[in-house]
Image (spheres, rainbow, N blue to C red):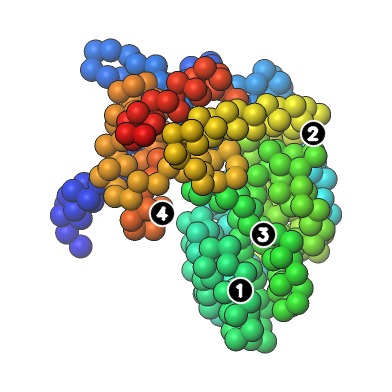
Amino acid sequence: MDRLNWLENRRQSGNLRQLTPVKRMLDGSLQVAKGAQKAVLHDFSSNDYLALSLHPDLISTSRKYIEMAGAGAGAARLMSGDLTIYHELEKKIAELKGQEAALLFGCGYLANCGIIPALVGRQDVLFCDRLNHASIYDGCRLSRARLLRFHHNDLNHLEDLLKSKRGTGEALIVVESIYSMDGDRAPLKELVFLKEKYGCLLMVDEAHATGLFGPNGGGVIEEEGVSSQIDFAMGTFGKALGSYGAYVAASGSMVDYLINRARPFIYSTALPPAVVGASLAAIKIVQEQPELRQKLFAKVDLFKSILAEGGLKDLGSSQILPVLVGASTVAVGLAEELQRKNIFTTAVRPPTVPEGTARLRFSITLHQKNSVLQETARTLLEILGK
């Protein structure tokens, strides 16, 4: 491969990824170097939905745990790194997700690349929503199971595939409860019906739902009352919970199985104690303070209402609002223009999203004041010529 030509082709198509060093301020805004000037930008690309990463309880509990157990675990958990604090967090996350047990992973990518290959193999079949996250697809490929993609949230297409391709081996359906690039929801009750009808396992990625939906912040599976019918509820601590790492919640026997089969768990050093402390504090907050998610979705409604007045509708059903623009070069240009107006939002381009669907992805968080939301929405409409 001619790597220089490949990079140049990516640049010309508007699909070249580049890092943007920033300094995060204590109010959640970003400082980016612009020549000799330091511009402070309103951050609309963060997944820190409840602003918990800067919450004093997370910071103080994190500090307590690092002082109690050190900066690192020192080993994988199957060696000498199985600190009691991990079991404390796993118990809390299992309760939050309505499951018997849970298992921690280093991050969401490692979780998906560990869980899926542990569950299915060459003689088995995977049914995967076309818009699932890249980490899910990488887990599917690593499994070497037969991969069948169904049209996004299309239950008829999924059932057609189940009828004709289910086979006699293990079958696993994988979806996201809230899709990270479109902000829409999976029809979980209907998916549970299909998985039971055709004898499949069902795995739900709740990375963008945990802490935000359900009476106790247990996610969409809690909100829709299907927690006990989901075989594997995977999620992360690095989004609404403001920390880092990931988990899967399942039956006790399934967690025991994953401890023995999920290679990213077996062969990775355990999470730093400070991260565990922050995650425990976050779970306590989302369970005890439902007003935080209520306040967040009031902000979402405010932002959406202004955009709707300008003709921008169909912006998802969550805190993630995609504004589709089509061409990657257009998306990049719009993101740059917004940054000049002190608004930081990321141009999401292929291969993260399908060709022709490049977009600006707006994440609404509690860091954003209502006045900032109003100003940003009007600025966006102006730039788009609405």
For the residue pair 71 and 126, the one nearer the viewer reads as 126
Which badge, 2 or 3, is on the more N-terminal residue?
3
**In the displayed structure image, the side of residue 379 where residue 64 appears, left or right:** right
Amino acid on which disc 1 is placed = Asn
State the mark number for residue 287. 2
Which badge, 4 or 2, is on the more N-terminal residue?
2
The residues tagged by marks 4 and 2 sit, at their Cα atoms, a distance apart of: 33 Å
Residue 49: name its quadrant. Answer: top right
Amino acid on which disc 4 is placed = Val
* Pair 4/2: label in front: 4
Which badge, 4 or 3, is on the more N-terminal residue?
3
Rendered residue at 50%/36% (across/down) = 308
Helix, strand, or loop for circle 3?
A: loop
Q: Is residue 189 visible to the viewer in this orientation of the structure?
A: yes
The residues tagged by marks 2 and 3 sit, at their Cα atoms, a distance apart of: 24 Å
Rendered residue at 71%/72% (across/down) = 194
Q: Is residue 97 visible to the viewer in this orientation of the structure?
A: no
Which badge, 1 or 3, is on the more N-terminal residue?
1
For the residue pair 288 and 24, the one nearer the viewer reads as 288
Residue contact between numbered discs 1 and 3, judged by CB atoms under 8 Å: no
* Pair 2/3: label in front: 3
Residue 285: name its quadrant. Answer: top right
State the mark number for residue 187. 3
Rendered residue at 30%/23% (across/down) = 340
Residue contact between numbered discs 4 and 1, judged by CB atoms under 8 Å: no
Residue contact between numbered discs 4 and 3, judged by CB atoms under 8 Å: no
Helix, strand, or loop for circle 1?
A: helix
According to the picture, the residue beneath numbered tag 4 turns out to be: 353
Q: Where is residue 57 drawn, in percent x and y?
A: 71, 21
According to the picture, the residue beneath numbered tag 1 turns out to be: 156
